[in-house]
Amino acid sequence: MRRKLIAIGKSWGIRLPRALVEKWGSDAQLEIRVMGGCLIVAPVGKMPRAGWEESFQKIKAAGENPLLDKEDANTETEWDHTEWTW
């Protein structure tokens, strides 16, 4: 899609199509960067795994580990006997 620069006071801007505003939200924060002569505009989203560190710290403080099923932690399966080689 092509857009023209528009004057906004003493600055310049680009009008975004309604579809992008509806997708990102009118209050979205945007990251703007230049790569290889291209202007890239993208919404600032949550980083992958955002908040995981805080969650792990809470689990540690509570002495819990929901990633391990305590009942099955030491239970052998058929796979242990037929497929696993030490």
Image: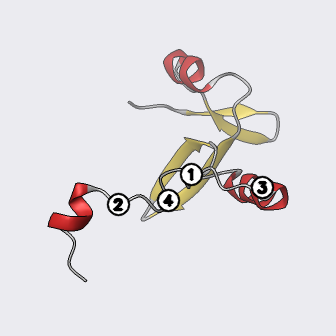
- First in residue order: circle 3 vs circle 2: 3
Does label 1 or label 2 sit earlier along the sequence? 1
Check whether the beta carbons of the residues at disc 3 and disc 4 lie within 8 A of each other: no
User: In the picture provided, is 52 more to the left or to the right than 73?
Assistant: right
Residue 35's disc number: none
Judged from the image, the secondary structure of the residue bearing numbered disc 3 is helix
Give the label, 3 or 1, closer to the camera.
3
- Tell me the CA gap for discs 1 and 4: 29 Å
Q: Residues within 10 Å of mark 3 (few under 14, many from 20)?
A: few
Which of the labelled discs sits on residue 54, or is there none? 3
The disc, 1 or 4, on the residue closer to the chain's N-terminal end is 1
Badge count = 4
Residue designated by label 2: 76
Residue 18: x %, y % from top left: 54, 16
Q: Between marks 3 and 1, how big is the CA–CA gap?
A: 14 Å
Density class for disc 4 (Cα within 10 Å; few <14, some 14-19, many ≥20) is few
Residue topped by disc 1: 48
Between the C-alphas of marks 3 and 2, the distance is 33 Å
